[in-house]
């Protein structure tokens, strides 16, 4: 009995010693290179934002922070790989709007970002712009709504694919405005914009950075931005929300997520590092040059945003009966 008691006391002592050591180890994070995995190809706004962040974190931490592109299956391949990796903070995933859409578009095969990852910090977003061709003959948002109501299904809008942010932006607009537009999906935004400029389609909800040169050249008309606040690069352009569709919001957003089980102390080091980088003039300037807006949200706020986005797109996908390709 006394021997059992001695073993029990020794076990308690070991636990007491282990806890401070564990905290100390986490305080020293990172002590080796960190990987940030993206589910899209290099060159996208998400990729650019992650690389700017990685550079800032490398300088701050004195450890390499490497960006790895692992495209495929609307970022599900990358998500699955990171979700099943060690939960130690050294392998991170860039969560995006695509992941919240996938939850309803591909429920059987998609990774549930709200269940299989912990939110660390939201990084930024690129607002979509509602643009039309000059040949459509509308000069403002209300004229577009009026024309769409007069000719249901006649005004076509392009997207970068079925179930993408530009597609669902159009579906949400149609539902809230009470109009019917004709959706024309393309394989990628470049093909969609090419046909938009050529007049084969008449409108698009496009990432601001994608259509900015064509707006400046007078080849496209910007009618509204889709964020809840005006886009930094278009401060004079009203939002869809301002123009009457209250609560309308869509954007290409992204944030950093860690596998479930990552220690809270490590999450806090990551959050602090990311948000310190967001405060630097260098990161802000590089984001602005790419049309990316800095969005600072910590774990709780970012987690709430992921849930709200997942719920919003789930409801829309079901009500509009949108199917995956």
Image (tube, rainbow, N blue to C red):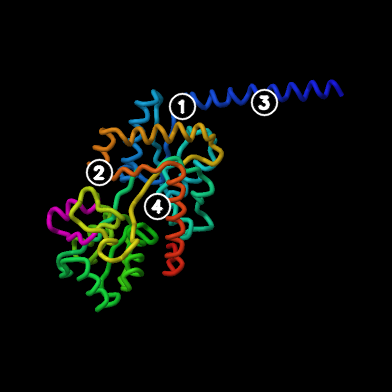
Compared across the picture, whether 111 is left or right of 136 comes to right
Q: Which residues lie in the magenta part?
A: 210-224
Q: Which residue extends farthest right?
A: 1
* Residue highlighted by disc 1: 30
Q: Earlier in the sequence, mark 3 or mark 2?
A: 3
Counting other residues with Cα less than 10 Å from the Cα at mark 4, is it few (<14), some (14-19), or many (20 or more)? many
User: Could you tell me which quadrant the C terminus lies in?
Assistant: bottom left
Distance CA(mark 3)–CA(mark 2): 50 Å
User: Could you tell me which quadrant the N terminus lies in?
Assistant: top right
* Residue highlighted by disc 4: 97
When asked about the image quadrant of residue 151, the answer is bottom left
Secondary structure type for disc 4: helix
Q: Which residue extends farthest bottom?
A: 150
Residue occupying the point 84% across, 21% down: 3
Residue occupying the point 29% across, 52% down: 127
* Relative vertical location of residue 64 with respect to residue 316 in this rendering, above or below: above
Tell me whether the residue at label 3 lies in contact with that at label 4, contact meaning CB atoms closer than 8 angstroms. Answer: no
* Residue highlighted by disc 3: 15
Secondary structure type for disc 1: loop
Distance CA(mark 1)–CA(mark 2): 29 Å
* Residue highlighted by disc 2: 290
Distance CA(mark 4)–CA(mark 2): 18 Å
Callout in the foreground (3, 2): 3
């Amino acid at each position: 009995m006394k021997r059992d008691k001695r073993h029990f006391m020794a076990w308690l002592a070991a636990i007491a010693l282990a806890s401070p050591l564990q905290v100390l180890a986490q305080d020293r994070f990172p002590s080796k290179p960190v990987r940030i995995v993206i589910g899209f190809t290099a060159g996208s706004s998400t990729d650019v934002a992650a690389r700017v962040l990685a550079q800032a974190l490398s300088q701050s931490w004195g450890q390499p922070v490497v960006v790895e592109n692992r495209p495929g299956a609307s970022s599900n391949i990358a998500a699955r790989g990171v979700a099943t990796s060690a939960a130690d903070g050294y392998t991170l995933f860039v969560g995006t709007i695509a992941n919240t859409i996938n939850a309803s578009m591909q429920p059987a095969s998609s990774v549930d970002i709200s269940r299989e990852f912990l939110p660390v910090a939201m990084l930024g977003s690129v607002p979509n712009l509602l643009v039309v061709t000059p040949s459509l003959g509308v000069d403002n948002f209300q004229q577009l709504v009026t024309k769409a109501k007069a000719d249901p299904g006649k005004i076509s809008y392009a997207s970068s694919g079925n179930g993408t942010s530009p597609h669902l932006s159009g579906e949400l607009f149609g539902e809230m405005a009470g109009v019917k537009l004709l959706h024309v999906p393309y394989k990628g935004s470049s093909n969609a914009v090419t046909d938009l400029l050529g007049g084969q389609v008449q409108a698009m909800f496009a990432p601001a950075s994608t259509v900015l040169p064509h707006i400046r050249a007078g080849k496209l008309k910007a009618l509204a931005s889709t964020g809840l606040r005006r886009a930094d690069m278009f401060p004079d352009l009203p939002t869809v929300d301002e123009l009457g569709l209250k609560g309308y919001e869509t954007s290409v957003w992204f944030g950093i997520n860690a596998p479930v089980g990552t220690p809270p102390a490590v999450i806090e080091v990551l959050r602090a590092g990311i948000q310190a980088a967001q405060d630097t003039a260098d990161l802000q300037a590089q984001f602005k040059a790419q049309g990316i807006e800095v969005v600072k949200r910590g774990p709780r706020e970012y987690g709430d945003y992921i849930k709200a986005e997942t719920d919003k797109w789930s409801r829309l996908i079901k009500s509009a009966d949108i199917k995956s390709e």
